[in-house]
């Protein structure tokens, strides 16, 4: 698999936006927000996860992004969703 820097570069090359901004007050309505991470990342972050989910943020595995690129269309979230 690839490291974070490589994944970020691929995200940017695909036309998606990468951000490290975690302030909920700045979330614009109508924009789909996705956090690409492994389940282990969420293990001790349940409170943050719940807050994000309530704000409409999706947590998906990096495989979702890669499969969407390979298929040249956005894949359904369900198969790739993760939770703590």
Image: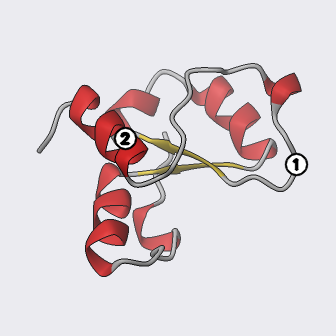
> Is there CB contact under 8 Å for labels 2 and 1?
no
Q: Disc 1 on helix, strand or loop?
A: loop
Residue furthest out toward the left: 1
Q: Is residue 7 left or right of residue 2?
A: right
Would you place residue 81 above or below residue 79 in this image? above
Would you place residue 62 above or below residue 72 in this image? above
Disc sitting over residue 57 in the figure = none
Query: Quick one: label 2, few (<14), some, or many (20+) residues within 10 Å?
Result: some
Residue at position x 56%, y 21% in the image: 20
* Badge nearest the viewer, 2 or 1: 1
Q: Judge by depth and name the residue closer to the eye, 59 or 32.
A: 32
In which image quadrant can residue 10 be found? Answer: top left
Give percent across and percent down for residue 40. 33, 33
Of the 4 image quadrants, the one containing the N terminus is top left
In which image quadrant can residue 8 be found? Answer: top left
Mark 2 or mark 1: whose residue is earlier in sequence:
1
Residue at position x 67%, y 21% in the image: 22
Q: Disc 2 on helix, strand or loop?
A: helix
Disc sitting over residue 39 in the figure = 2
Q: Is residue 52 left or right of residue 68?
A: right
Give percent across and percent down for residue 32. 69, 54
Residue at position x 48%, y 39% in the image: 84
Q: CA distance from mark 2 to mark 1?
A: 26 Å
Residue at position x 75%, y 32% in the image: 51
Tell me the residue that label 1 is attached to. 29
Query: Quick one: label 1, few (<14), some, or many (20+) residues within 10 Å?
Result: few
Q: Is residue 34 left or right of residue 75?
A: right
Give percent across and percent down for residue 30. 83, 56
């Amino acid at each position: 698999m690839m490291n974070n820097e490589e994944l970020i570069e691929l995200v940017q090359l695909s036309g998606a936006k990468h951000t490290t901004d975690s302030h909920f007050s700045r979330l614009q309505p109508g924009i789909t927000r996705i956090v690409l991470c492994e389940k282990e990342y969420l293990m001790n972050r349940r409170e943050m996860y719940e807050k994000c989910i309530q704000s409409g943020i999706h947590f998906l595995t990096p495989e979702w992004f890669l499969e969407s690129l390979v298929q040249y269309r956005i894949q359904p979230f369900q198969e790739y969703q993760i939770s703590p």
